[in-house]
Amino acid sequence: REIGFLRRITNKSIKFYFDGRAAAAEEKKYVAIKNKNFSLKKYVSIANIYFLEYETLISADRIFTVSKVLQEYFSKTFSIDIEKFVNYPCLSDSRKFYFDPQVREQIRRELELSDDKIVFIYPGGIGSEWHVAKQMFRFFNELVIQYKNVVLLLLTRYKDLPNLLNAYPNLNNK
């Protein structure tokens, strides 16, 4: 709304770029359904988020998304022209994040991971319900049972990780 207002009151061109990192209404709906808390108040809240997402997306000159899936969701759900989107899968700087065999070897040594170990890396949040951490941990717990050479490396800021992992005895709690 503010962008529309600024565009109306000024004769200068205003470009608005939206950084879309999530489908907020879908996340809220997912949690409401999961918790069986789909009251009228919750429904109105979710509807307001959908409307705000729509208003934001149609007023944006460009929309940055973190995945093609999110881009397609926004495009189909809100009838947004696909040409408005710029997809960038992450904010990684290729000068800092790149494959280097020596660095790989050093990190594996530091983490005491032999070459026969298959390492799955999960970088990100696990504290919110839409991260579906419990399902991910159940999956990896079963994977570790079947394949002894599998390791899950979690890169997260989640403070209570050790307690969360206690329910999955086959995952290494380092």
Image: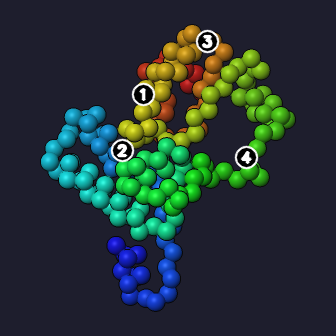
Q: CA distance from mark 3 to mark 1?
A: 20 Å
**Residue shown at the point (42%, 28%) measured from the top left:** 134
| 101 displayed left or right of 14 | right
Across and down, in percent, residue 13 comes to: 50, 82
Q: Give the label, 2 or 4, closer to the camera.
A: 2
Could you tell me the amino acid type at mark 3? Tyr
* Observer able to see residue 163: no
Tell me the quarter of the image containing the C terminus: top right
Q: Earlier in the sequence, mark 3 or mark 4?
A: 4
Disc 4: CA contacts within 10 A as few (<14), some (14-19) or many (>=20): few
Could you tell me the amino acid type at mark 4? Phe
Which mark is drawn over residue 97? Answer: 4
The residue wearing badge 2 is 27
Q: Earlier in the sequence, mark 1 or mark 2?
A: 2
The residue wearing badge 1 is 134
Q: Are marks 3 and 1 in contact (CB under 8 Å)?
A: no
Tell me the quarter of the image containing the N terminus: bottom left
Could you tell me the amino acid type at mark 1? Lys
Q: Earlier in the sequence, mark 1 or mark 4?
A: 4
Disc 2: CA contacts within 10 A as few (<14), some (14-19) or many (>=20): some
The residue wearing badge 3 is 147
Q: Earlier in the sequence, mark 2 or mark 4?
A: 2
Across and down, in percent, residue 145 comes to: 55, 11
Disc 3: CA contacts within 10 A as few (<14), some (14-19) or many (>=20): few
Could you tell me the amino acid type at mark 2? Glu
Q: Classify mark 4: helix, strand or loop.
A: loop
* Observer able to see residue 108: yes
Across and down, in percent, residue 126 comes to: 46, 38
Q: CA distance from mark 1 to mark 4?
A: 28 Å
Q: In the depicted view, which residue is nearer to us: 14 or 163?
A: 14
